[in-house]
Amino acid sequence: MTLVDLHSHSTASDGDCDPAELVARAAVAGLSVLGLTDHDTLAGIPDAAQACESQGLRLVRGCEFSVSVWWGEMHLLGYFLPLGDRALDAFLFEQRQRREKRGATIVHRLNAHGVQIGLDDVMRQANGAAVGRPHVARALVAAGTVPDVQTAFDRYIGGGCPAFVAKDLPAVSEVTSLVAQVGGLTSAAHLGRRASRAALGRLKDSGVDGVEVRHPSHDEDTTAKIERLATALGMLMTGGSDWHGDHGGPYRALGDVTIPADWLERLDDVANIRARERKG
């Protein structure tokens, strides 16, 4: 039986495990295929690829982009992304710079509310990874300001909180165009209740190839609804555990949320067609 999990994170962004350990855990979980989709970076891919070769797993090279859509922020999964592409690397570098700038602004707002924490504390938690709010939260825990990460979000850095800072986001069409240019595919991540026929149709018109059907935040009814809509609209289907670590929250264990092998076969078919078109 082929178990496919196309959504996971490592320490290259905000996951708990480095890429090699993530792959080792995937092997223990019985996965055959793992998609590594760190936020705004491909830095974990080489180590993950080496580990997958050793463990006998297939790695799908991915990335989770943050993009702007009509309702605000959406996460967009990119798959089959090449390493060393200048345009893609430059874009991802810019996004990581924006993340660091956002982190500095969050720290400034925390300081204004009497929370004594520095950007260095956040960067220490990131340890070279793409900076995100989880790193700020971990720094707040390390400083003794809050007892846990969830409290940091609830009290300080979540939406509507004193130190919340919205992201400076690229348009969804900008990212889908870039990913298509380098031969990749895109899938709208964990849409939940936002996944209406009109919304998916509009995303498809913006260049989005597929939609994440299976995700820990989707109940059975939502999963079934999105699958029906994707089928009706001719969109690709993806899914996975969105695993960051064993810290609870909305996430499930690595490999607990998988997709049928034929969904991956369809992704492969479309990616191969796109690759032939680029060569032609």
Image (cartoon, rainbow, N blue to C red):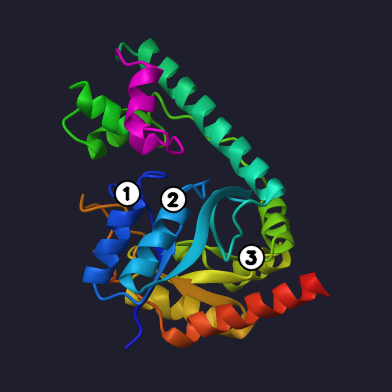
2 or 3: mark nearer the eye: 2
Residue 216 image offset from top left, x and y in percent: 32, 65
Residue 151 image offset from top left, x and y in percent: 23, 34
Residue 13 seen in render: yes
In the rendered image, which residue does mark 2 sit on?
Answer: 44
Q: Distance from label 2 to label 3 (Cα)?
A: 18 Å
Task: Please check the rendered image and state whether residue 60 is part of the magenta-colored stretch, yes or no.
Answer: no
Q: Distance from label 3 to label 1 (Cα)?
A: 24 Å
The one of 38 and 71 positioned closer to us in this rendering: 38
Q: Residue at x 71, y 55 (%)?
A: 178
Count neighbours of disc 2 (C-alpha within 10 A) and say few if under 14, some if 14 to 19, many if 20 or more: many
Q: Residue at x 46, y 78 (%)?
A: 225
Label for residue 103?
A: none
In the rendered image, which residue does mark 3 sit on?
Answer: 184
The residues colored magenta run 116-136
Task: Please check the rendered image and state whether residue 119 is part of the magenta-colored stretch, yes or no.
Answer: yes
Q: Distance from label 1 to label 2 (Cα)?
A: 8 Å
The reply to whether dot 1 and dot 2 touch (C-beta < 8 Å) is: yes
Query: Tag 3's secondary structure?
Result: loop
Mark 1 or mark 2: which comes first in sequence?
Answer: 1
Give the total number of marks visible in the rendering.
3
Residue 36 image offset from top left, x and y in percent: 43, 60
Inspect the image, locate mark 2, and give the three-letter code of the amino acid beneath it: Gly
The one of 233 and 264 positioned closer to us in this rendering: 264
In the rendered image, which residue does mark 1 sit on?
Answer: 18
Q: Residue at x 53, y 46 (%)?
A: 40
